[in-house]
Amino acid sequence: MDVIYFAWVRERIGLPREVVETRAVTVADLVDELRAREERYAVAFEDVSALRVALDQELATFDAPLAGVREVAFFPPMTGG
């Protein structure tokens, strides 16, 4: 599946996107897999309460299932202005 990183998540990981092979059932499982990869992922996903996630461009929660999902995007909350 394609995993896309925005804003400071991208800066901490050092990639805008990547293709990830995963056995994760939920977004939270995917985050756990990514954290275990390298320190930069652990730092980026240290506080998931500071992140939002979209599955196939639809806002979702971290307990959302990944079955059939083609794209996961992680980003900080949007602010108005």
Image (cartoon, grey):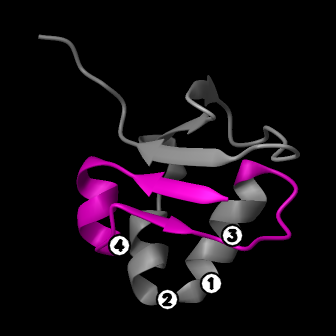
Looking at marks 4 and 2 on the same chain, the residue that comes earlier in the sequence is marked by 4
Q: Indicate whether residue 17 is drawn in magenta.
A: yes
Q: Residue furthest top?
A: 81
Q: Residue furthest left?
A: 81
Mark 4 = which residue? 13
Q: Position of residue 69 (x, y in %)?
A: 76, 43
Other residues around mark 3 within 10 Å, as few (<14) / some (14–19) / many (≥20): some
Point 81% across, 47% down: residue: 66
Whether pointer 4 and pointer 3 mark residues with C-beta atoms closer than 8 Å, the reply is: no
Give the spatial CA distance, label 4 vs label 1: 13 Å
Mark 3 = which residue? 32
Mark 2 = which residue? 38
Q: Amino acid at mark 2?
A: Glu
Other residues around mark 4 within 10 Å, as few (<14) / some (14–19) / many (≥20): some
Q: How many marks?
A: 4
Point 68% across, 69% down: residue: 32
The magenta segment is 1-27
Vertical position of residue 45 compared to residue 34: above or below:
above
Give the spatial CA distance, label 1 vs label 3: 6 Å
Q: Amino acid at mark 1?
A: Ala
Give the spatial CA distance, label 4 vs label 2: 9 Å
Looking at marks 3 and 2 on the same chain, the residue that comes earlier in the sequence is marked by 3
**What secondary structure is marked by label 2?**
loop
Mark 1 = which residue? 36
**What secondary structure is marked by label 4?**
helix
Point 64% across, 63% down: residue: 31
Looking at marks 4 and 3 on the same chain, the residue that comes earlier in the sequence is marked by 4
Vertical position of residue 8 compared to residue 53: above or below:
below
